[in-house]
Amino acid sequence: MSEEKSLNFIEEIIEEDLRTGKHQSILTRFPPEPNGYLHIGHAKSICLNFGLALKYGGKTNLRFDDTNPVTEDTEYVESIKEDVKWLGFNWANEFYASDYFDQLYSFAEQLIEKGLAYVDDSTSEEIATQKGTPTQSGVRNQYANRTIAENLQLFRDMRAGKYKDGEKVLRVKIDMSSPNMHMRDPIIYRIKHAHHHRTGDKWCIYPMYDFAHGQSDSIENITHSICTLEFIPHRPLYEWFIEQLGIFPSKQYEFARLNLNYTVMSKRKLLQLVNEHHVSGWDDPRMPTISGLRRRGYTPESLRDFAERVGIAKRENLIEFSLLEFCVREHLNKIALRRMVVFDPIKVIITNYEEGKTELLSSENNPEDPNGGVRSIPFGREILIEQDDFMENPPKKYFRLAPGQMVRLKSAYIIQCNEIIKNTDGSIQALHCTYIPESKSGQDNSGIHVKGTLHWVHAPAALQVEVREYDRLFQVENPSSEEGDFKSYLNPNSLKVVTGYAEPSIKEAASHDRFQFLRKGYYCLDKDSSSDKLIFNRTVTLKDGWTKK
Ligand code: ATP
Ligand code: MG
């Protein structure tokens, strides 16, 4: 099935640039600020930047945009690198905006020398007022008239630590009546006496985002600098700096950020959930972080598939969480090991099966995978099935177990229910059934056809495991757009801990294994597991139960 996929707008631009010889090869970058863990929105950006380079034989840099010393941390740097690698991508270079602090400083002096930058002593409030409004021009203050020599001296004094935080800033002189507020003499350097995670105490002035990001692109010769829509108004400034400094003409292109329903997607908000213990950490399986999704059992393939399906849009929209779940089901169906786990058991005694005897039955690990192999499952006189799979007074067309009715036990035999054994309070203690010895799966010559197949476990061999079932983290589709604190919309039932009775082969589960618990969903081992207590995360249910709700 070869389906010609049409190019997205960035691919069209790249193909044109390569065709006309504007670029011989392309270089993209992924530029996270190391102030939190990456989320699924970043995964979208990673897949886009690395994906384009792979498609067109180019390269991608990983650049940490670390110009904000107060919120940044090496823990975040490490987690970001792990996440990018886990998604399956290799960067050409690992760079840090802070590597360019000397270069950026000299760019600033160049602008001063060209009469294009000045030191301003106003407070941030004064600067904001003087900027005007989108419909009203701003006004320049007296500091804009400082001489080049005076500006150079003051800027050097700022760097030397002569002034306190906020006492002075460096601004570029562009146009105080530009309809674009970003062009009204924006600030490019601020004083901040803070320790930086890489440069230590070398600097007490730091470049603003707009004076670091674009210039970093140019320093690295990035050909296509892809960012999200909110940076459209920054583009004229990006280009103004390139022109005034005469540096490599990187080009900025914007696409719509990914928004997912029933979650939040800003590091600041995710940090609040972590700090205020609404979740167990950045990698809580309910978090939309890459580390959370990984722990939950998502695969890199499923996230890449998701990014591909979402595509790139030029307008903001809200993507359904169900699409992400669809992608992971698609992949897990192909790779997950099938196992039987009973959650809410009822005991079945097979009265015509020899007491004390167990036999080992064989079952495919994955019918979707011809090389998946088989496992053995013990079978004996006492087994457990789901309470849900039995009804004392079933309606018509009920194909599961009921008095007098027959079902197949998956990979085992057909059984028939003969008697219900009750406790004195009326609750069911056990079901007495008989099995059909000629009906063994794979060699069935009983001639009996049944419609229902149930999962089950051999009671004495069953291993008790903890299973963590997750639901949406928020109760509303778009918590960030609701009134009040977004945290008041948290779903109080987003985590349910239940017990499962698993077939014994589950003992060999390893952290990279993916499982389908038959008729239930997809699961993976959680890192909280120990040798005497296995804990599983439910990645996703087998069917989409959410859109119906
Ligand atoms: P947040 O607002 O969540 O903190 P950010 O944009 O501040 O995100 P950065 O570390 O600056 O996070 O982002 C690194 C890259 O990832 C940027 O190029 C940014 O545009 C991109 N990115 C961030 N969030 C999304 C998203 N939701 N969808 C697509 N790309 C995103
Ligand atoms: Mg940011």
Image (cartoon, grey):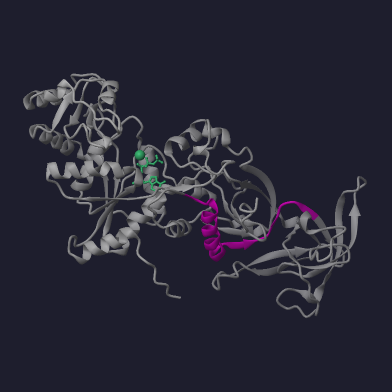
Left or right of 123: which side holds 312? right
Position of residue 158 measured from the top left corner of the image (x, y, whole percent) = 18, 24
Q: Quadrant of residue 138?
A: top left
Name the residue: 8% across, 25% down: 147
Name the residue: 79% across, 67% down: 407
**Above or below 68: residue 545:** below
Position of residue 346 measured from the top left corner of the image (x, y, whole percent) = 80, 54
Say if the magenta span includes residue 322.
Answer: yes
**Above or below 322: residue 283:** above
Left or right of 87: which side holds 410? right
Counting labels gives 0
Position of residue 30 measured from the top left corner of the image (x, y, whole percent) = 32, 49
Name the residue: 15% across, 22% down: 143
Which quadrant contains ligand 1? top left
Q: Quadrant of residue 193?
A: top left
Name the residue: 66% across, 66% down: 376
Left or right of 43: which side holds 9? left
Decide which of 510, 238 is in the foreground and name it: 238
Say if the magenta span includes residue 309.
Answer: no
Decide which of 192, 497 is in the foreground and name it: 192
Q: Which residues are magenta?
A: 318-346
Left or right of 457: which side holds 218? left
Position of residue 413 measured from the top left corner of the image (x, y, whole percent) = 77, 70
Q: Is residue 229 visible?
A: yes
Q: Is residue 64 visible?
A: no
